């Protein structure tokens, strides 16, 4: 894959990893629609390294506060909202990690190398999750703030990440924000909690697949593009959701899913 394609895919990754519209759908759809070489495992890892760096840079202060408060809760019995959230994130990540590994293996066995089938599944999951995101956001009240998220809510939101591993096109951020909204967590808090949940599971996934990564200029450019774009997208979404809704993302998912479905049947 050339440098230009790597930069484009890096921008696509940075945009779609954090917006609830599915990075896996777009990273598979772009090469398929434009007849590029399929996304390699090495490039996939590189792009996720870039967005992982974006999460680290944006939330490093939050994580320091969470980690310090979390350990104080254990060692000094000091209760704090940050300490509570830290351990909720830890507990929520465990089932998500285990389920993701299992469901990813099952999904790979079913889909295999059938690209056309994969694109049809992506199309249907884009549409279905678009409808669910719209309903969750429209019907649910915003009564729960970030600092008031419960253990039960944390586990449900965290475990939902596994569906993104099982079905390409679901979107990790999309499913976590959808479940959070169904649980009446307000929009901005849903996004922030989703981003914090993303760090440990993305880090684990990158480490697990790191042997597939090899240094070359195209991969480095992909990392830089996804990192820079990701920083701006995180900031944009958190600001946008203070007043805006998820409606525009839900509609986009449905439209993009229909486009992919049409091409899947005519290609």
Image (cartoon, rainbow, N blue to C red):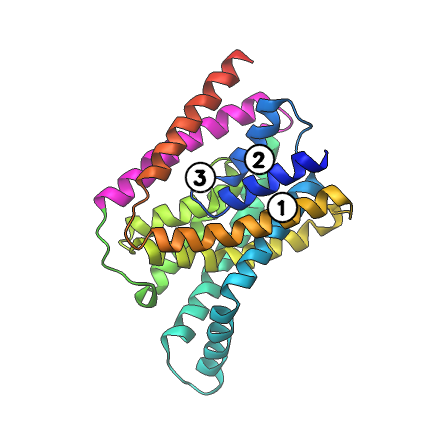
Q: Which residue is mark 3?
A: 21
**Does residue 91 appear in the picture of this structure?**
yes
Indicate which disc, 2 or 3, sits on the residue closer to the N terminus: 3
Q: Is residue 82 above or below residue 58?
A: below
Secondary element at tag 2: helix
Q: Which residue is mark 1?
A: 47
Could you classify mark 3 by the number of other residues whose Cα lies within 10 Å: few (under 14), some (14-19), or many (20 or more)?
many
Give the alpha-carbon distance from disc 3 to disc 1, as whole Å: 16 Å
Q: Is residue 241 above or below residue 168?
A: below
The structure residue drawn at horizontal position 60% and vertical position 34%, both measured from the top left corner, is 108
Q: What percent of the width, then of the height, locates residue 210?
A: 71, 51
The structure residue drawn at horizontal position 47% and vertical position 50%, both measured from the top left corner, is 233
Q: Is residue 5 left or right of residue 249?
A: right
Indicate which disc, 2 or 1, sits on the residue closer to the N terminus: 2
**Does residue 45 appear in the picture of this structure?**
no
Q: Which residue is mark 2?
A: 27
Could you classify mark 1 by the number of other residues whose Cα lies within 10 Å: few (under 14), some (14-19), or many (20 or more)?
many
Q: Which residues are magenta?
A: 111-139
Q: Quadrant of the image for the C terminus?
A: top right
Indicate the quadrant where residue 144 lies.
bottom left
Give the alpha-carbon distance from disc 2 to disc 3, as whole Å: 11 Å
Give the alpha-carbon distance from disc 2 to disc 1, as whole Å: 10 Å
Secondary element at tag 1: helix
Which SS does the magenta portion mostly show?
A: helix
């Amino acid at each position: 894959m050339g440098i230009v394609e790597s930069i484009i895919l890096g921008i696509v990754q940075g945009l779609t990893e954090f917006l609830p519209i599915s990075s896996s759908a777009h990273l598979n759809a772009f090469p398929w629609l434009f007849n590029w070489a399929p996304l390699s495992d090495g490039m996939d890892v590189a792009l996720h390294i870039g967005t992982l760096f974006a999460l680290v840079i944006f939330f490093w202060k939050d994580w320091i506060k969470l980690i310090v408060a979390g350990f104080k809760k254990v060692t000094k019995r000091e209760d704090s909202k940050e300490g509570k959230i830290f351990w909720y994130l830890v507990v929520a990540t465990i089932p998500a990690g285990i389920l993701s590994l299992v469901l990813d293996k099952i999904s790979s066995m079913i889909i295999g190398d059938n690209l056309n089938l994969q694109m049809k599944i992506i199309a249907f999951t884009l549409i279905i999750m678009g409808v669910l995101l719209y309903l969750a956001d429209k019907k649910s009240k915003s009564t729960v703030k970030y600092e008031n998220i419960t253990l039960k809510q944390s586990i449900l939101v965290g475990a939902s990440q596994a569906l993104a591993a099982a079905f390409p096109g679901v979107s990790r951020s999309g499913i976590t924000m959808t479940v959070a909204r169904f649980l009446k967590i307000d929009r901005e808090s849903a996004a922030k909690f989703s981003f914090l949940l993303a760090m440990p599971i993305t880090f684990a996934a990158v480490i697990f697949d790191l042997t597939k990564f090899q240094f070359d200029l195209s991969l480095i450019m992909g990392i830089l593009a996804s990192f820079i774009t990701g920083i701006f997208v995180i900031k944009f979404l958190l600001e946008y959701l203070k007043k805006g809704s998820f409606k525009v993302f839900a509609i986009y998912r449905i439209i993009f899913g229909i486009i992919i479905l049409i091409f899947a049947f005519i290609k």
